[in-house]
Amino acid sequence: MHVNLSNVLVRVAGRRPDAVAVRFGGDELTFDQLVTISRQFSAFLDSVGIEPGDRVGIYASNRLESLPLLVGTWMAGAIAVPYNLSVPRGPLRHAVEDSDPALIVVADTEVELIQDVCDGLRGADRILAVGPSAATAGANWTWHDVTTMPEREEVVPRLDDDEALLMYTSGSTGTPKGVRQTHRTSGAAIEATIDTFGLTADDSALVCTPLFHVGGLQLISLPVLLAGGSVTLMAKWDPISWVDLARRWTPTYVALVPTMAIDVANRMSGTDPALLSSVRICAVGGSGLPEGPLRRFRDATGIGSVINIYGQTEQNGLAACERLGENPLPVCLGRPLEQVVQWRLVDPTTQERVPDGSEEIGEYQVRGDAVTPGYWRRPDANAERFVDGWFRTGDLMRVRPDGQLEYVERIDDMIISGGENVYPQMVENYLASSPDVAEVAVIGTPHERWVEQVTAIIVASHDGVTVADIASFCQQHPDLRGLSRPRRIEMVPSLPRTGNNKINKPELKRMFR
């Protein structure tokens, strides 16, 4: 079947040409302008010899040009490769070398970095710079070369299985892998998100997560745009700026990782509530948001519609979520989007399927329209992560009595202490209920008797909190005893984060090994 996601946006623009599609800073693009610039970028790519199936790299933070770059790449039949700005030089070079882009779009401030990191690679010799200093950045072309091109009306047809995107995993536990996202898998995930949240042209999104992650792109930006709504992009995360923009533009849909919600709650503490009453969907994903920080966030913002969501790069964004209004508090992952994924739970040790009706913990495995067909040029990774057509997510879950999924832990993060399984996220949730705790991460560290011990890394909510205070809280909490009790407690001023503002547990394990 011939399908190209850019055609969907062209049809939306035909219905709503003068409506605002994208905002950034003080600038705006209507849908008609978005399509025009996308067609100019497609024409530019054609003029410099980009063929259908070629990769176009993008190394730039959220900006006004971000979405025209993406859509224009699709119009040309090429594959967009948004590189992660937060990874070190080694993984970045690997991603560029592995994807072998025919051209890289680079923010003007990062051209020298890309030329240095990618020295000797094809992409380093074909750079298009974007930004106010593009003309002096030392690139081959500038955005002026794009916007002076005549529009290319043709949209190159693509098949269902043709890649639309390659998104590289963070590589925190190994070499980054390029996740293949086809026009079909991305389209299915976007359609399911629109359907699940009832998105329409009346919706608007405030996007504070980077578009090189599915959370920023396929969870929120593309569904809102393809429903005919508007998207306001932030260049980088700042809790006060986020509140200010939410007050100004009254979004109906926002998406955060738990750290961001905690940032807002902490920064707004002691001030009048922001009263962001326009928000009807506040999706929180990446890990669970404990009840204590959740209540502080709700008090600080007035947002009552906070729901847990679950998705992976390999599942093209949203794959399971709580339904709006279903639970009084976000207490679980909700239910899978069964219109695009089939799922099962499998015992990670025996590989036997967890029986229906059981509350046993198992690995969540999926297959379906929204699931990647595999990794780019990695048959070894495909053999490891796919079993008889099922994708092994590496996430441990169980089914609650009400039929909703409850996230337990990443298989890699599970602590085995004294031969017993301890699930760090559960311990984190208990610790987060302490008024002395602003943020917490729990990891396993070596222990001469127990092999691994539960270690709590604590950011205090106020001055004067000591290790003894946290230990006393644990002694009094009924769920923080036995092997779940943190035997090691470390106080830190802040927790390391990934580029998507998740807590960087691999880094913590290196710090406290």
Image: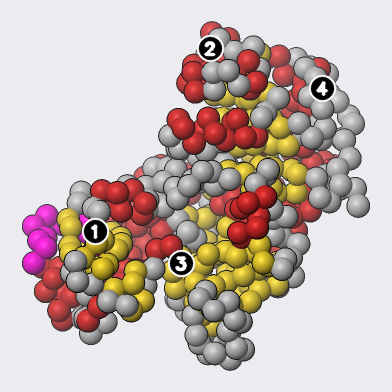
Front: mark 3 or 2: 3
Numbered circle sitting on residue 384: none
User: Which of the marked residues, 4 or 3, is nearer the chain's N terminus?
Assistant: 4
Residue at 63% over, 15% down = 125
Residue identifier under label 3: 411
Q: Is residue 359 magenta?
A: no
Q: In this picture, is 390 found above or below 359? A: above
Residue identifier under label 2: 137
Q: Which residues are magenta?
A: 454-468
Residue identifier under label 4: 46
Per the image, label 4 sits on a secondary structure element best described as helix
Residue at 15% over, 79% down = 475
Q: In this picture, is 316 found above or below 101? A: below
User: Which of the marked residues, 3 or 2, is nearer the chain's N terminus?
Assistant: 2
Circles 4, 1 touching at the beta carbon (< 8 Å) = no
Residue type at tag 3:
Ile
Residue at 53% over, 30% down = 93
Q: Which of the 4 image quarters holds residue 336?
A: bottom right
Between the residue at mark 1 and the residue at mark 2, the CA separation in whole angstroms equals: 42 Å
User: Which of the marked residues, 3 or 1, is nearer the chain's N terminus?
Assistant: 3
Per the image, label 3 sits on a secondary structure element best described as helix
Per the image, label 1 sits on a secondary structure element best described as strand
Within-10-Å neighbours for mark 2: few <14, some 14–19, many 20+: many
